[in-house]
Image (cartoon, rainbow, N blue to C red):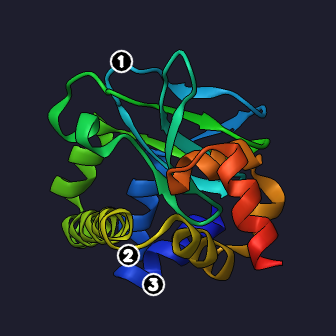
Amino acid sequence: MHQIRKFIDTISPLNDSDWKFFSSKLKEARLNKNTVLLKAGKTENYISFISKGIVRLYVPREESDLTFGFLFENEFVTAYDSFLTQTSSEYQIETLTETILWRISNKDLQEVYKKTKNGNIIGRKMAENMFLIKSKRELSLLSKTAEERYLDLFTNRPNLLKQVPLKYIASYIGVTPQALSRIRKRIT
């Protein structure tokens, strides 16, 4: 739990009483590899801090899933659109490795917002960060080639390439596994 306090303090420090209240709402979840956190069609009720592990966000399809996000240690994971609107999610979230999460429910988070000094600031800054990540991803898909997206991934998250199956990386950059293989050959 120390990890999450350290992370939150970089956003907007919580005093000890606010931290005590916030941390009392957190529930630890230890999950195996390939555990579905949220199924498409279900409503997201949690925001989770990844203490350990890797998580992917994807649209399930019969022919092949469409992966559109990866999240790692010291990041938050949620189907944020479903969480905010309390409507069904159109995508799924699953662990790619053994994962430890610290989760807070929507109801408890609303209480934290009401009863703590910095809760709303932290929530706003996290929402802004999620927006920036989404915006950067959309611009990348619109303005860069698959090879440029792969190189960006390789530069920004080199461990991803060692820890995530290539079929998910191919889907993430918008190509088939065969096309990713050709891109990798050209680069090396």
To which residue does mark 2 refer? 14
Q: Position of residue 138 (x, y in %)?
A: 31, 62
Gap between marks 3 and 1 measured at Cα:
32 Å
- Write down the residue under mark 1: 42
Q: Point out the frontmost of discs 3 and 1.
A: 1
Q: Residues within 10 Å of mark 3 (few under 14, many from 20)?
A: few
Q: What kind of residue is marked 1?
A: Lys
SS state under label 3: helix
What is the total number of numbered labels drawn onto the structure image?
3
Eyeballing the image, is 89 above or below 52?
Answer: above
Residue 40: x and y in percent read 40, 21
47 and 96: which is toward the camera: 96
Q: Nearer the viewer, mark 2 or mark 1?
A: 1
Q: Which residue corresponds to the image point at 20% horizontal and 28% vertical from the top-left?
A: 86
Front residue of this view, candidates 187 and 43: 187
Q: Which residue is mark 3?
A: 10
Mark 2 surroundings: few (<14), some (14-19) or many (≥20) residues within 10 A: many
The answer to the question of whether label 2 and label 1 lie on touching residues, with beta carbons closer than 8 A, is no
Does the CB distance between marks 3 and 1 fall below 8 Å? no
